[in-house]
Amino acid sequence: MAELDVLLSAAKEKLLQSEVSEALSLAEQATKLCTEKDSRPYELLGEVFAEQGEFDKAKAAFEESIRLAKSSNNEDLGYEKYLWMAQMGQQGEPSLELYNKGISILEILAQKQQGNADELAEIRKKLVGAYCGIAELFMTDLCMREDAEQQCEHFTDLALKMDPSSAEALQTFASMRISQQRVDDAKAALKKCIDIIFNAEPDVELPVYAVRTSIAKLLIEIGMHDEAHQLLMLLQKEDDQIVDTWYLLGWNCYVEAEELQENSAPHEEIEGLLVDARSYFLITLATYEKTAWDDEGILNHTKEVLSVLDTLNLPSVDESGAIEEAIEEEWETSEDEMEEDH
């Protein structure tokens, strides 16, 4: 095996093991051996940068990989650069073209891997993600096209046919149905998502954080607050240093309180939710500062909601150790509720 292939193989293995620093070092070494005929080193370097959250560097690496692929006569079987660039580098029609290029490569690879169940499963998973990405495009950047709804239905259907139990595909379907004001269909799909996540076997890989966060946002949007809370508590238990999770926990309580107020629910119930919302938002700010998070939208909205809550004369609570203790107790309660529900 050539030295370049050895480096690429080792870097991929390190990336799979989440040893990102080691993967970066190996990928950078591989780029030094890169020729005008091989786009793989820069594609892998882009993946490593993306994993680190260094999206500007990732974009530059993917662009170089695409340039090399276009200038080479070799068969281009690297789909990652196109799928990543479709998400981070382009919008609208250019993004659609990149998705389609990635899909065409995945379809070629699927034919080549018919006898390899593990490889084929990974390819099908990537195809589901690409189909969902295109469906989302037709709900956002390309929503003004005359065929937008038809295309969104088509690619969502492709994703679900590829894997009916994919939480990502079900989440995309739910998002589409919400946009069509078919809320009952959306609720049914999101309930399936929740079942998939909470009934997963220990050795089954859960949907990625971004997908589960999107599911939580949709649950909040259509008023499934208990399910949203359970899912967000699961994410908080996995990693309590992610600002988005704390923010969504607070927002879920706040939105539910507003809905209860509109329905003239008991004052104590509304007040309890608002107190919880305030606690979660305060933790959001503390975690934001502690982790040097970079999302001014969340920061500004959190401060805005807290300023509203400060005018409501809510009961004061110990916003330090007592909150953490209450969250731990709440997690244990949520676990019990999940076991009863499932």
Image (spheres, grey):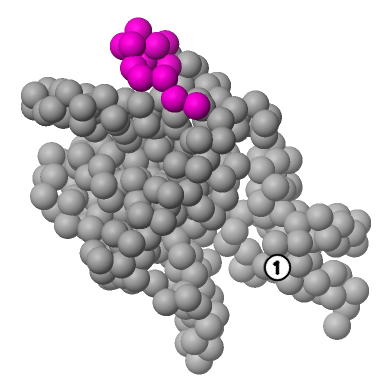
Q: To which residue does mark 1 refer?
A: 17
Q: Determine if the magenta segment contains residue 28.
A: no
- Report the amino acid beneath label 1: Gln
Q: Position of residue 21 (x, y in %)?
A: 81, 55
Quarter location, residue 181: top left
Residue 114, position in %: x, y? 48, 87
Magenta run includes residue 310: yes
One can see residue 99 in this view: no
Can see residue 201? yes
Residue at the top extreme?
311
The residue range painted magenta reads 305-318
Foreground of the two, 215 or 332:
332
Q: Position of residue 151 (x, y in %)?
A: 26, 50
Identify the residue shown where x is 34% and y is 71%.
199
Residue at 57% x, 61% y is 79
48 with respect to 309 (left or right) = right
Badge 1 element: loop
> Looking at the image, which residue is at 39% across and 48% down?
330
Q: Which image quadrant: the C terminus?
A: bottom left
How many dots with numbers?
A: 1
Residue located at (23% from left, 64% from top): 341
- Name the quadrant containing residue 45: bottom right
Left/right of residue 145 with respect to residue 24 in the rendered view: left
Residue farthest toward the bottom in the current orientation of the protein? 115
Q: Nearer the viewer, residue 280 or 108?
A: 280
